[in-house]
Amino acid sequence: MTASYVATPPERLPALNDLIAATRELMLAAGTTDVEPDRIRQAESLIAEATRLLGEERRMRVHRPPVERAVAGERLFHLAPLNPLGIPLVLSVTGRRGTATLVPGALHEGPPGLLHGGFSAAVLDHVLGVLIFAQGLPVFTATLELTFRKSIVLDEPMEIVGEVTRIEGRKAWAEAFISQHGLRTVEARGLFVRPATSTRPAGG
């Protein structure tokens, strides 16, 4: 195993991105398959072989490539692009405001047909943290207050909007909400703090 947070060679990134995308598709297929048991066992064997192949050399932690790029005056942040369990969002940041769109699927289900509340909370926390990071302040969440107003339906787009409302020294306050079909579903407001010994991590 190699050490934690070793820089990922740029030439590996296209293959790693494709691998993570394929893994997410596999997770969805595994969670929703309705094939016969013999086909499930066949797939299990193929997955075991892929696991053995990929596990020949490992890191202690997932790859963390650069997450930011600029497009037409916007700053785009790819949230956890090389972690199959990460939230596959692209956050568009202009000033202190950020927006993103996500279509939640079967893997995010809580009540039948609806998004799990814990996943929506994770989305809002992650968006706010990255939005504050975009202001040059790497932070940890200190407090996060959530208000659940309406259920979020699976397989339909939801919009996430966040804004940094105040920065004072090592502290930042921010608010965000999720909407679907023009109606607010979940709202969040939080306090985020940069540890006294914190330095901005390379590549996010």
Image: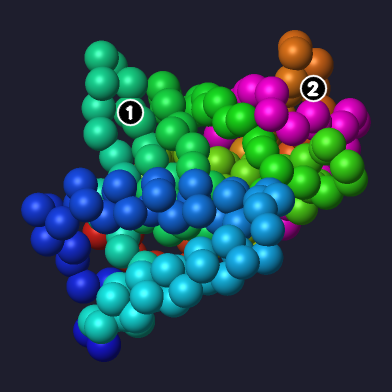
Left/right placement of residue 44 relative to residue 155 reads left
Quarter in which the N terminus is drawn: bottom left
Q: Measuring from the top left, give residue 27's x and y in whole percent.
A: 56, 55
Question: CA separation, marks 2 and 1?
Answer: 25 Å
Quarter where residue 63 is shown: bottom left
Residue type, label 1 = Arg
Q: Does residue 164 appear in the picture of this structure?
A: yes
Residue type, label 2 = Arg
Label 2 Cα neighbours within 10 Å, binned few <14 / some 14-19 / many ≥20: some
**Residue located at (27% from left, 55% from top):** 16
**Residue located at (35% from left, 31% from top):** 76
Label 1 sits on residue: 75
Against 49, residue 7 (above or below) is above
Residue range highlighted in magenta: 143-166
In the rendered image, residue 41 lying in the magenta stretch gets the answer no
Q: Measuring from the top left, give residue 101's x and y in whole percent.
A: 56, 26
Name the mark on residue 198: none
Disc 1 is placed on an element classified as strand
**Residue located at (83% from left, 36% from top):** 113
Which secondary structure dominates the residues rendered in magenta? strand
- The residue closer to the viewer here, 152 or 31, is 31
- The residue closer to the viewer here, 136 or 44, is 44
Q: Does residue 138 appear in the picture of this structure?
A: no
Q: Measuring from the top left, give residue 128's x and y in whole percent.
A: 57, 42
Against 59, residue 196 (above or below) is above
**Residue located at (61% from left, 57% from top):** 30
In the rendered image, residue 157 lying in the magenta stretch gets the answer yes
Left/right placement of residue 71 relative to residue 180 reads left
Label 2 sits on residue: 184
